């Protein structure tokens, strides 16, 4: 059982992380100040520095706080699927769904913290200085999927599997950043916040792409 002092420290650090997830998901990393983070959390900059040191180590804490939950679920879904069908019988559609569903379930769910985190990760993932942290938090669960993509589609090379995976990440994350471009393109018929509409076409879109890359590779060979 946590003592009152430990509870207070945990509550303060969580409030700061919540603040960071929201701000980094709605602004550029360079535009977010320590003062912004502390103010939104109802804290002061001294508390932020005490708990996290500097802005970059704080960003790392923001990325890694929830990553293990997604990774455990992705690994569990993959292992359960392999147990049912056997590793040599995996198919691309179930693999894609097992990887994407844990993220989308939370991005579309009722928990505002998870919704903020999803948008935050989708925003920060392409910042080059975040790449090592993303790798630290997510690659252990992601790399077995890349291996399975090659089993499902034997003509995929290691390089093409990784590049297809990057397209997967780009499509998944771009679906939940509320990009108003979709509303302009459809003259208001479609809404950027309708994540379920993106999810509905995401798996078939990605599966077709993976299969076509594999098919093209076989023709080259």
Image (cartoon, rainbow, N blue to C red):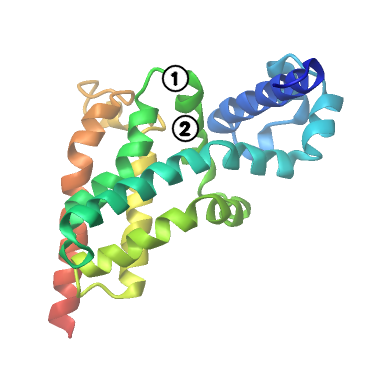
Q: In the shown orientation, is residue 67 left or right of residue 205?
A: right
| Residue 37 appears in the rendering | yes
Whether residue 180 can be seen here: no
**Is residue 116 shown left or right of residue 164?**
right
List the residue tagged with mark 2: 119
- Secondary structure of the residue carrying tag 1 is loop
Q: Position of residue 133 (x, y in %)?
A: 60, 52
Q: In this picture, is 128 found above or below 37?
A: below
Which residue is found at the position 23% from the left and 42% from the top?
Answer: 202
Place of residue 6 in the rendered image (x, y in percent of width and height, measured from the top left): 77, 23
In this view of the protein, which residue sits in the foreground, 4 or 126? Answer: 4
Q: Which label number is shown at residue 151?
A: none
Of residues 150 and 186, which is closer to you in this image?
150
Residue 157 occupies quadrant = bottom left
Residue 149, given in percent of the width and then of the height, sits at 26, 63
Tell me which numbered mark, 2 or 1, is placed earlier along the sequence.
1
Q: Is residue 132 left or right of residue 194?
A: right
Q: CA distance from mark 2 to mark 1?
A: 13 Å
Q: Residue at x 48, y 57 (%)?
A: 139
As drawn, is 65 to the left or to the right of 58?
A: left
Foreground pick, 197 / 87: 87
Question: In the image, is residue 29 above or below residue 152?
Answer: above
Q: Quadrant of the C terminus?
A: bottom left
Q: Which of 73 and 27 lies nearest the eye of the viewer?
A: 73
Vertical placement of residue 98 versus 179, above or below: below
Q: Residues within 10 Å of mark 2 (few under 14, many from 20)?
A: many
Q: Secondary structure at mark 2?
A: helix
- The residue that mark 1 highlights is 111
């Amino acid at each position: 059982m946590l003592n009152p002092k430990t509870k207070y420290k945990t509550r303060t650090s969580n409030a700061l992380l919540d603040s960071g997830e929201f701000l980094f998901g709605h602004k550029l990393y360079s535009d977010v100040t320590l003062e912004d983070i502390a103010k939104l959390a109802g804290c002061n900059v001294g508390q932020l520095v005490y708990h996290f040191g500097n802005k970059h180590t704080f960003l790392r804490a923001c990325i890694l706080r929830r990553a293990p939950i997604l990774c455990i679920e992705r690994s569990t879904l993959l292992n359960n699927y392999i147990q049912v069908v056997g590793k040599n019988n995996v198919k691309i559609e179930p693999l894609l769904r097992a990887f994407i569903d844990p993220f989308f379930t939370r991005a579309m769910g009722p928990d505002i913290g998870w919704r903020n985190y999803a948008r935050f990760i989708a925003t920060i993932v392409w910042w080059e200085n975040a790449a090592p942290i993303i790798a630290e938090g997510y690659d252990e669960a992601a790399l077995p999927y890349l291996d399975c993509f090659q089993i499902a589609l034997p003509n995929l090379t290691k390089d093409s599997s990784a590049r297809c995976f990057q397209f997967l990440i780009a499509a998944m994350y771009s679906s939940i950043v509320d990009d108003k471009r979709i509303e302009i393109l459809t003259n208001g018929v479609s809404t950027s916040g309708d994540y379920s509409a993106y999810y509905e076409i995401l798996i078939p879109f990605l599966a077709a792409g993976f299969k076509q890359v594999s098919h093209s590779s076989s023709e080259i060979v």
